Amino acid sequence: MRKIKLIWDFRGLAAAKTAEHHEIHLKEFLEIENYSLQITGYELISEMHAIAYLVVEEADMIRFRDALKPHRGVIYE
C-alpha cells in the first residue's frame, strides 16, 4: 500500500523552530489516535523555509488531512 507524506510549510526567520515544534504536536496526535505508523519529522529547506511532515497510509490520508489540515502532500518513497 502506498504511503502519503503530509506536509506543513513554515516560512520566515522562525520557520525552523516552528517546524520542529509542530512535529511534537504531530507525534502527540499519533499517540492519541494510536496510529501504528510513526513516521514524522522536520526539514530545513532554506534559511527562511522549513517543513514538518507526517507519513500515513493512503487509505487513512483523507481522515488525517481533514483533521490536521496539511498544506500539501506527496507520495512517500
Image (cartoon, rainbow, N blue to C red):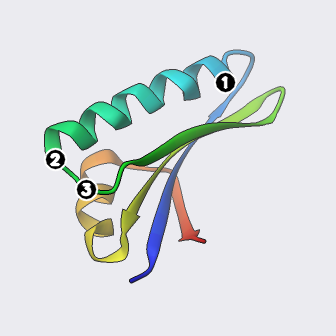
Distance (Cα) linking label 3 and label 1: 28 Å
* Rendering coords of residue 65 (x, y %): 33, 58
Residue position for label 1: 15
Q: Quadrant of the N terminus?
A: bottom left
Q: Nearer the viewer, residue 77 or 73?
A: 77
Residue position for label 2: 34
Specify few, some or many for label 2: CA neighbours under 10 Å numbering under 14, 14-19, or 20 or more. few
Specify few, some or many for label 3: CA neighbours under 10 Å numbering under 14, 14-19, or 20 or more. few
Quadrant assignment, res 47: top right
Figure check: 28 above or below 6: above
Tell me if 40 is positioned left or right of 66 in this view. Answer: right
Q: Amino acid at mark 2?
A: Asn
- Residue visible at 53% across and 58% down? 72
* Rendering coords of residue 32 (x, y %): 15, 38
* Rendering coords of residue 41 (x, y %): 54, 40
Indicate which disc residue 27 carries: none
Q: Amino acid at mark 1?
A: Ala
Mark 2 or mark 1: which is in front?
Answer: 2
